[in-house]
Amino acid sequence: MARLSKLPGFPNLRFIPGPEGEDSLGIVRWGEPEPAYPRGWFLRRKLARYDIESGRYYGYSEKAIRRFIEERYGRRMARAIMGR
């Protein structure tokens, strides 16, 4: 990670440790943090919004995101969250 921090193209460099007791060593991430996973009431709507934010974060087109939301949550939910 020290080497990466000296190279251009790795903004906001951070280490995320793996779960304790597993063979995972952890992950190195950079750039903007990915959307936080939702919790709490109205979970279905929050999950749909999370999927939209994640799709945008990873560079999917609005058309692809809408299609995914419609397939997973239905057209009604897609319209309610993303508009017509």
Image (tube, rainbow, N blue to C red):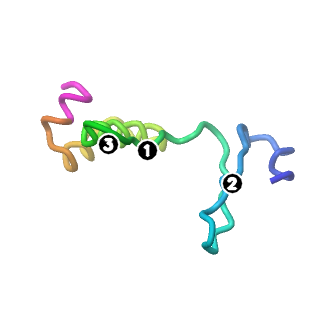
Estimate the x, y position of residue 25 in percent, counting from the top left. Answer: 68, 66
In which quadrant of the rendered view does residue 41 lie? top left
Q: Closer to the camera: disc 2 or disc 1?
A: 1
Q: Which residue is identified by label 2?
A: 28
Q: Give the range drawn in magenta.
A: 78-84
Q: Which of 62 and 49 is in front in this view?
A: 49
Q: Mark 2 belongs to which amino acid?
A: Val
Task: Report, in whole angstroms, how far the alpha carbon at label 2 lies from the one at label 1.
Answer: 19 Å
Looking at the figure, which quarter contains the N terminus? bottom right
Residue that numbered label 3 is attached to: 47
Could you say which quadrant of the image residue 5 lies in? top right
Q: Is residue 43 magenta?
A: no
Neighbourhood count class around disc 3 (C-alpha, 10 Å): few under 14, some 14–19, many 20 upward: some
In magenta segment, residue 83: yes
Q: Are marks 2 and 1 in contact (CB under 8 Å)?
A: no
For image coordinates 86% across by 52% down, the residue present is 3
Q: Which circle's residue, 3 or 1, is located before the other in the chain?
A: 1
Looking at the image, tell me whether mark 2 or mark 3 is earlier in sequence order. Answer: 2
Q: Relative to the observer, which residue lies in front, 21 or 28? A: 21
Q: Distance between the residues labelled 2 and 3?
A: 25 Å
Task: Name the residue at 43% across, 37% down.
Answer: 56
